[in-house]
Image (cartoon, rainbow, N blue to C red):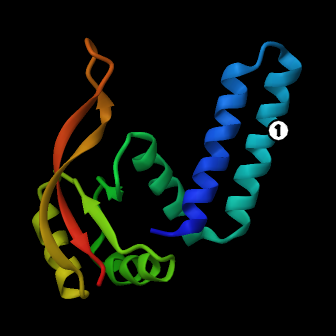
Amino acid sequence: MTNNFIAEYNELTNIRNAYDRAESEVEKNAARGDFKAFKERIAAKGNDYAKYFWIFEDAWRRGNNYIDFSDVIRDEDVPNMITTLRTLGFRKFTFSSSWSSAVETAWLFTKNGCLLEGMVEINSKHKDFETDEYERIPAYLFNLN
């Protein structure tokens, strides 16, 4: 996993914590300004960087160990996706899509040089209403080699 993404995730967490601790509108506005500046710095690093940072941030905020892809991925996007993840320093990712074409997409990952290590359980994007805990779902675990 990229050290840049981890450092930026920690910076974002600090900004969110500052907002949560804010006792006045002045402090909240300062945190909002820091968040806006943070988003602009991430965007300035390019579309691919920003796209994968926010996917990473979402997965880590939910307590997952890897960047997770849960949506439909178009077949023609797979080669660039794999190349970009490698370039950004990712070594592994999970794929938790439950769309009907998920197996075909997983096959495309292997055809583009990824190794399917097996399956793991991850935190989904949804929280249980009664427990406020993330629901656990199965995901493929891929190694980018």
The answer to whether residue 135 is visible is yes
Q: Residue at (58%, 51%) from the top-left corner?
A: 9
Read off the residue under disc 1: 33
Q: From the viewer's perspective, is 46 left or right of 81?
A: right
Residue 90, by quadrant, is: bottom left
| Residue count near mark 1 (Cα–Cα under 10 Å), binned few <14, some 14–19, many ≥20 | few
The answer to whether residue 101 is visible is no
Quadrant where the C terminus is found in the figure: bottom left
Q: From the viewer's perspective, is 31 left or right of 51?
A: right
Q: Foreground residue, 67 or 48?
A: 67
Q: How many marks?
A: 1
Q: Foreground residue, 23 or 84?
A: 23
Q: Foreground residue, 99 or 58?
A: 58
Q: From the viewer's perspective, is 134 left or right of 30?
A: left
Residue 117 placed where, x, y %? 14, 71
Q: Residue at (27%, 60%) from the top-left corner?
A: 94
Residue 107 placed where, x, y %? 13, 76
Mark 1, secondary structure of its residue: helix
Q: From the viewer's perspective, is 54 left or right of 69?
A: right
The amino acid on which the numbered mark 1 sits, given as a three-letter code, is: Gly
Q: Residue at (79%, 42%) from the top-left corner?
A: 34
In this view, 46 is above or below 111: above
Residue 15 placed where, x, y %? 70, 38
In this view, 61 is above or below 81: above
Quadrant where the N terminus is found in the figure: bottom left
Residue 124 placed where, x, y %? 28, 40
Q: Residue at (22%, 78%) from the top-left corner?
A: 109
